[in-house]
Image: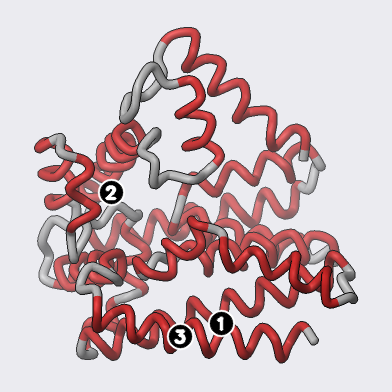
Amino acid sequence: YAVPAAMLVAIGTFLVLQLLHRMVPGTGADLRAVLRAAATAEHGHDIYAPALQFLDRGNLRQILKMSTTPYVYPPPLALLARPLTALPMHLALALWDALNVSMLAILFVNVIRLSKARTLGELFFVGLIYGFFPLNMGLGNGQIDLTITVLCLATYLLYRRDRLGTAGMVLGAIALIKPTVGIILLYFILRRAWPLVRAFVGTALAGICLSLATVGPAVVWEYREVAMGWANAFGVLPLNQSIHGQLGRLFAPSLDQEPTGLAAALLFACEGTFPIIA
């Protein structure tokens, strides 16, 4: 039942997203940011200027009302998305939605197979992932997170099948899009999967060199400033449902403020235990 159920939900989700885009102009804001950065890079301009200006203003919650959010990913994602800039926005968004709902279906089927769920009750329980707030927010905003999630699962499945080189390249490609996910590499280091680690490093270095050659060292270095500012600014906003966001709010002195001092040390220690336990 897993494959037909996943396909039906994927098609239904795609149709709902198309209706949502017509009714709520702010949906798809993340993809618009990626496409704007792709077009900006193509013309040789600074892709991180909007993000730095937004951080300087300090009104973080304003992002919830923006139809095009600032671009905060590394340069490779903007370079990969460049072909989509030749399409009308509604068509590019529809193709992006199709990718995301396909990844959602693949994720569902693989979780079913890995968990060996067989009964309708078990299928329903796994189906609760469709109600996970960060997942739904990522779909509505046109984020790349679902693809990253599926690629992370693919990395682990390739590792289990002893295809360490391929797994390392996949994980390296993920880190070039969202570097924070690269912490998963610690799991494989603890497992002493050195061929995977070498492939990861080689892929990451190749992507960095490509970015340096395409957008220039100044823009690549500027990403560091954007990433640090974004992480510090949005760590404890209620919309951040990640492990870091949940723990950050637990230790934070007040809403929208990152923990400091001993509380920050405890937060770091708690987050550091996850890859070790895994």
Q: Which one is in front, 13 or 86?
A: 13
Give the numbered dot on residue 220: 2
The answer for how far apart the CA atoms under marks 3 and 2 are is 34 Å
Callout 3 secondary element = helix
Q: Quadrant of residue 177?
A: bottom left
Q: Residues within 10 Å of mark 1 (few under 14, many from 20)?
A: many
Circle 2: residue type: Val
Q: Is residue 99 left or right of residue 114?
A: left
Q: Which residue is mark 1?
A: 102
Q: Is residue 76 above or below residue 269?
A: below
Q: Is residue 249 left or right of residue 211?
A: right
Look at discs 2 and 1 and give the one toward the viewer. Answer: 1
Tell me whether the residue at label 2 lies in contact with that at label 1, contact meaning CB atoms closer than 8 angstroms: no
Q: Is residue 94 visible?
A: yes
Circle 1: residue type: Ser
Residue in the picture at 47% in, 59% down: 206
Look at discs 3 and 1 and give the one toward the viewer. Answer: 3
Q: Earlier in the sequence, mark 2 or mark 1?
A: 1
Q: Is residue 169 visible?
A: no
Q: Quadrant of residue 230?
A: top left
Give the numbered dot on residue 14: 3
Give the numbered dot on residue 225: none
Quadrant, the C terminus: top right
